[in-house]
Amino acid sequence: MNPSLRRFLTDPKAIIGLTILIVTVAAALLAPVLFPRDPWQMVSRPFLPPFQDARYWLGTDMLGRDILAGIAYGAQMSLIVGIVSTAAALILGILVGAFAGYNGGWIDDALMRGTEFFQTIPTFVFALLMVAILAPSITSIIIAICVVSWPPVARLVRSEFATLRSREFVKAARVLGESNSRIIFTQILPNTLSPVIAMSSLMVASAILTEAAISFLGLGDPNRMSWGYMIGAARTVIRQAWWMSFFPGLVILLVVLALNLVGETLNDALNPRLSRKGRQ
Amino acid sequence: MTTPLLSIEDLTVALPGGGDRRDAISNVTLRLNRGEVLCIVGESGSGKSITASAVMGLLPGDQLKVTGGRILFDGRNLLDLDESAMRRIRGDRIAMIFQEPMTSLNPVMTVGRQIEEVLETHDVPAAERPAKVLELARAVDLPDPEEIVKRYPFGLSGGQRQRVMIAMALALEPDILIADEPTTALDVTTQAQILDLIRNLQRVRGMGVLFITHDFGVVADIADRVAVMQQGKLVEEGPIDQVLVHPSDPYTRKLIAAVPRFRTQRPETVPEGPLLRVRGLTKIYRSRQGFGTMRETRAVDSVSFEIARGETLGLVGESGSGKSTIGQCLLRLASIDGGEVLFDGKDIATIQGRDLLAYRGRAQMVFQDPFASLNPRHRVGRSIMAGPLAHGVPRAEAERRMTALLERVDLDAGAARRFPHEFSGGQRQRIGIARALAVQPDLLIADEAVSALDVSVQAQVLDLLREIRRELDLAMLFITHDLRVASQICDRVVVLHQGKIVEQGVVTDVFGHPEQPYTQSLVAAVPGRSWHGDQRESETSNI
């Protein structure tokens, strides 16, 4: 087995993180099977406290909707938003960063000033503004999160490209007559991916948090159950029904923690020299 | 017999598990007497630097552990001392200088202040310090000491920085100076000056010097006694005359035989017309200083030369002479600012697109660093086939060439499926040569292609290049800073200095009877000249 992969899989932090993520993904995929009824539908009496009815283990909310079903369907929303927006941000960031870093000169200057423009606006306010303008829906949330999260990727990829560009193996590829796009995608890009992969797991975590925050403020997709929406709805009744905000909040905490653990161990596994230095 | 200043007895340092051998150094026993220079010489991985670090107590404790032996200094075992006692010995009694003078100095502190800091750490009264700093600067022959101590390291040349390092090491008049490859990063003329300086200071102050190097030429110039190390073991030790002239160990003999020497036999002349004709090549680097003002540096200034098929032309010079820039220009890795480069009669200075691609199918390069010149994420086979594939050669043909070339450079066919990190430096350089040859070029440019290699490997790669040039009737441009290597492989040489050609001609004429003062100083600075002379005489007398 690949040594980086083995280092990753034998790290207890990674095992904890991966377990939580696998459970979350399973919940999202199996939600329609486990909870065949619509999570928006009333199933029991309102304000049913947790651990009293075995059928509704985590209780119900003020309209008698099952909290556990809500969390399972909310996992779908969080994971879709997290993964799709991160993937889009990675593609955009890598393209901009690679192009700027490989070419240098005025192309680099122009692209990086553009990137900095996006970074000067506070990300959450910017995302919120975009969702408000585009009308709340899952697509607009994904677009908004993607737009605010690609600049760090672009900067990272650019700096990696700028150093690798002058390496001898890249010069050798130029002398051998390989085209620029081939050099970018087959020679340099594979050498820049380790930090990008580690970063992407943290980006999924922050995308999930941003989505939860947008939904909390009531700008979420009105047709989809979401953890942020559940907490937002529970806000007014927090004294009567603590469980309504506690369980979705706990799930967000665990998933974000898991993604951070995975990201950190990926980083260690992919850059073993750096991490060993850190531990000394 | 007098008691030695420093004695290392049966020293063993273990490597962390999973290495290719168990001990970094095993059972090394060495003595250093007062007033002598002991050279430890060996190839990379021989454990010579680890021995020095062990004496200074600088081994990274979590990775390299001393598992046996003693290091006796002043009647005490240095290995038993705690950190604070060791700190008093370091600098005060035993000082060390390193290879890289740029990274050994703090870039944001004036050099005078850095020398002063050493004095401060070891409790020299503040009132005496400035005078002492100047005295030290004078002792290491820094020009204009009053002025230079106020400068920052970036304002000094490499040789001056190494002098500052030596001044810091001498600040407390140590008994022992440990020098770990102190001249390897320097130009040959600077190296000769620094070696002189160390030798003089050692004589004047009666220090013991432990000098670590890979270069037998340096050994010949500086050592009183020599210790040869191989793979963590001491293979031979003795007075310089004995080890260099009548080595008893087979490994030492092999190493000494591999040291490149000046060739005396005149190379055969090449009758053919030139393949590459360079006329007035000029490269200008512009850097902006503040607003509007541009500073121009002529890295290459109207350089003209020719190379014929079947001929090797050497470009030699010190750092900053523009020799590598010329290589980059000829392959169009750097743009050309003036002059013409006629390849097979066509000017390639400004060609683009299809023409440039076609040219790159006929001119190739072997790079200096065998670790940086191969993509770490590509298998070797893929790296070698990249060139032919980019030139539209069918995959089957590219594979056939790759297999044939791997065999030609003495690597087994399984090498194609492995990654670069599984190979040694010399093997990687062979892969680099195979990659360049895969497009079947007419012109091969080797940019310091053997500089990063150990001397025995260097000899093998030079042999390989020589054979290939003959077999394929290539025109070869060999760029190097090492005159001895150039003398070994080149037919003609061009000597460069600050972007201009100083002298060019047949290699034995230029190095044997240099006409220009600069060339004369270069040749005179080559380490181990007297020894090479002895060697030749002793060889002829043996016959």
Image (cartoon, rainbow, N blue to C red):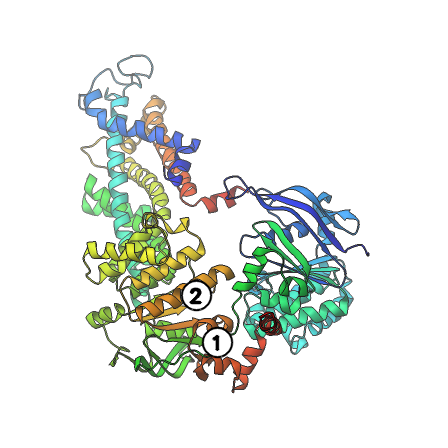
Give percent across and percent down for residue A121: 33, 53
Q: Residue furthest top?
A: A53
Give percent across and percent down for residue B348: 26, 77
**Label of residue B368 in the image:** none
Of label 1 and label 2, which has the lower sequence position?
Answer: 1
Q: Chain letter for mark 2, please.
A: B
Q: Chain letter for mark 1, please.
A: B
Check disc 1 and give the amino acid type: Gly
Nearer the observer, A27 or B72: B72
Q: Is residue A110 visible?
A: no
Tell me: B150 left or right of B426: right
Q: Give me the residue at 39% from left, 36% from top.
A: A6
Which picture quadrant has residue A66? top left
Tell me: A125 left or right of B290: left
Q: Name the residue under label 2.
A: B462
Nearer the observer, B312 or B304: B312
Give percent across and percent down for residue B396: 20, 54
Q: Which residue lies furthest to the right in this view?
A: B1
Query: Which quadrant of the figure contains the N terminus of chain A?
Result: top left
Mark 2: which secondary structure? helix
Q: Is residue B309 above or below residue B463?
A: below
Check disc 2 and give the amino acid type: Leu
Q: How far is mark 1 from mark 2, CA to CA? A: 19 Å
Which picture quadrant has residue A228? top left
Q: Do labels 1 and 2 share a chain?
A: yes
Q: Give me the residue at 35% from left, 70% from top.
A: B470
Query: Which quadrant of the figure contains the C terminus of chain A?
Result: top right
Q: Name the residue under label 1.
A: B317
